[in-house]
Amino acid sequence: MTTETLDARRFRALRQDWASEDLARFFLLTPEDMREVRTCRGASNRFGFALNLLLLRLLYCPLSEVNLTPARIVQFVAMQLNVHPEVLAEYSTRRPQTRDEHLVQIRGYLKLRPYVHEEDDPHLAEHLLSRALQRDDPAVLLEEAEDWLREEGILFPAESTISKIIAQVRPQAESQVFAALMSQLTPTQAQALEDLLRRDQGKRGSTFAWLKEPAVKASPASIKALITKLETVRQLQLNTIDVSRLPPSFLSPEACGIAGLLPSGSPAGTAGSAFDLV
């Protein structure tokens, strides 16, 4: 492992310029912490144990090598333990089993547990599905997942585990959204939407593709074309559809393709506001 580890998203916070007040907030050992640290024998073991404790409490995932901890943090913790910062180098030479035993002890002290795929995957997926119905953004969902894990007292699994679950729930959320919309369509409305995708003989593209084409330039012809498109959209009579419970990300003009397809009264990109400019 190299210092590139600290460039990873989860460890990037360690690379900041730590002000004294931030060090005191995140890396100050409490009296309870000190009692736990003193259960270790030897200065280097106590130093490594203390750093692992503080890092695990902050990051919810272990830093594979504590000697990668920024010097400012190392010095602050060393001062509290009354040891020289160079003592940490000795901890890195300890057998891996010692560090593993320390992490198990720290997890018990902090009341944290490892992520268990068979047990936690379904619960995390359920939570993320409910969140994806509110905000369908992979980066936001990743943060939502980590917030949930913190609340449950579960250490973070590999990011690939969370990303895989996000990739599974996003299509499910989309299907639920479309099902909610389709359930409100009359047969006539549903057929009219299907007809938008049909390419009539002699035409280069579908009506839907034509509706999405932006104006080339500001001109009377462009305004006339937009008015024609507006009339085409209004003929679909979609303003009766209730979209109040749908995620804003599904209601944006970009997501819908055509701002005018949004029923009036929708919270983002309404038909009225979009075409009043015409």
Image (cartoon, grey):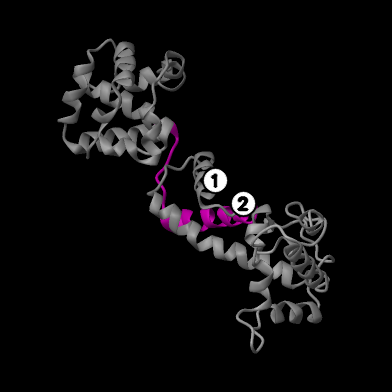
Quadrant where the image shows the N terminus: top left
Quadrant where the image shows the C terminus: bottom right
Above-or-below relation of 181 to 130: below
Above-or-below relation of 83 to 165: above
Helix, strand or loop for disc 1 = helix
The spot of residue 78 in percent (x, y) is: 29, 15
The spot of residue 13 in percent (x, y) is: 40, 31
Residue 111 in the figure: left or right of residue 231: left
Residue 256 in the figure: left or right of residue 95: right
Helix, strand or loop for disc 2 = loop
Q: For the point 22% across and 13% down, which residue is it?
A: 84
Q: Which mark is residue 135?
A: 2
Q: Looking at the rendering, which quadrant does residue 83 occupy?
A: top left
Q: Looking at the rendering, which quadrant does residue 183 occupy?
A: bottom right
Q: Which residue is mark 1?
A: 144
- Label 1 with label 2: CB-CB less than 8 Å: yes
Amino acid type, residue under disc 1 in the picture: Glu
Q: Depth check: 143 or 249 in front?
A: 249
Amino acid type, residue under disc 2 in the picture: Arg
Above-or-below relation of 186 to 25: below
Q: Residue furthest bottom?
A: 201
Among numbered discs 1 and 2, the one appearing first in the sequence: 2
Q: For the point 79% across and 53% down, which residue is it?
A: 277
Q: For the point 16% across and 24% down, which residue is it?
A: 90
> Can the viewer see residue 168 in this picture?
yes
Q: Which residues are magenta?
A: 109-135
